[in-house]
Image: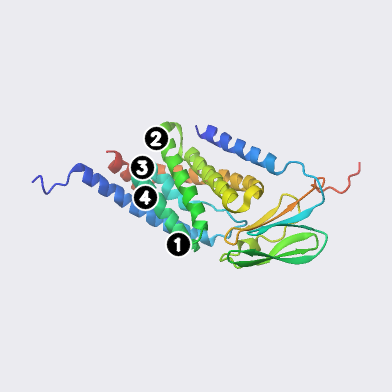
Amino acid sequence: MDIFVALAAAGVIAFAAVSAYGPESGPVTAVLKGRDGEWVYPLSTDREVRVAGPLGDTVVEIRGKAVRIVASPCPNKTCIAAGAIDRPGQWLACLPNQVFVSVEGRRSDGGIDASAY
Amino acid sequence: MAASMPPRTDARQKTYADITALLGAFCFFLSALEYMVPKPLPFMRLGIANLPILLAADLLPLTWYLALALVKVFGMSVISGSLFSYVALFSLAGTLTAALAMWLARRIFGRLISAVGVSILGAVLSNAVQMGIASLVVFGDAVRLIAPPFLAAGLATGALLGVFAELFAGRSTWYARAMDETHG
């Protein structure tokens, strides 16, 4: 039974991973979700965005093709501690202030720029 | 003579209450330990506060077992400061669903399933329920990005906690005595 439970769990995880990290298209963008809506910004332009939540404003910074949360009114600041994200599929979340930040768009080819034989 | 000897069922209820109180106190203590460990991402928890609930699956009847789960949710929420915020709902729904599933798994499969299987079942189910609520209440479709690492973490921490619980149950004299008192 132990093995059955573990395999079932692994199956659910594999399904979740496939549906989350499937092929995407379009340029790489930062998607900011807050209580009042969703905003999409290109990663290529530096800017600072304030996203309103029930506790106050979460400050999101886009700089050097990466996104991070630099200020948040939540108690534990886990969202700030998570650091910067820059690859599609990565995300930051602040549960207390209901803010979700993710990078979406085309995946780079595994991070290898060139290879030679 | 008969009046001075409490009926057997009363003594059993007292044993259940004692075990629930002791394990509930451990939930508080382990929640405090859990809180000290930095979280790399929101939602990611070691789940060590679930150890008493895992151990209690063989000791307590359902009502006492769910009472223990509620004590754990209360302790966790008080210590993490989320008691009066909607974040406590995640803990409540996840813990109660997992507790119910773990208790049933032990009753239905008995010795066919060890603490490892019960623990993985509880951890992954608890995380899945929390993802479901996160999807409904706040993050919507974005939950698909959160789910894979969160569920995988549940599988890993659930398995580790299960191994620990299995070792503990095998060696603890307190656990052996509690088993005797609740099953004798």
Type of amino acid at the residue the image marks with label 4: Ala
The spot of residue A57 in percent (x, y) is: 64, 67
Q: Chain of mark 1?
A: B
Q: Foreground mark, 1 or 2?
A: 1
Residue where numbered disc 2 is placed: B107
B77 to A18, vertically: above or below = below
CA separation, marks 3 and 4?
Answer: 8 Å
Amino acid identity at mark 1: Val
**For the residues marked 2 and 4, what is the alpha-carbon distance in whole angstroms?**
18 Å
Disc 4: host chain: B
Circle 3 SS class: helix
| Residue topped by disc 3 | B62
- The amino acid at mark 2 is Arg
Q: SS of the residue at dot 1?
A: helix
**What residue is pinned by disc 4?**
B67
> Mark 4 or 1 closer to N-term?
4
Looking at the rendered image, the disc whose residue lies closer to the viewer, 2 or 3, is 3
What residue is shown at x 51% (from left), y 46% (from top)? B126
| Residue at image mark 1 | B78
The kind of residue on which mark 3 rests is Leu
Q: Earlier in the sequence, mark 3 or mark 1?
A: 3
Q: CA distance from mark 4 to mark 1?
A: 16 Å
Indicate the chain on which mark 3 is placed.
Answer: B
Residue at the image position 51 percent from the left and 51 percent from the top: B47
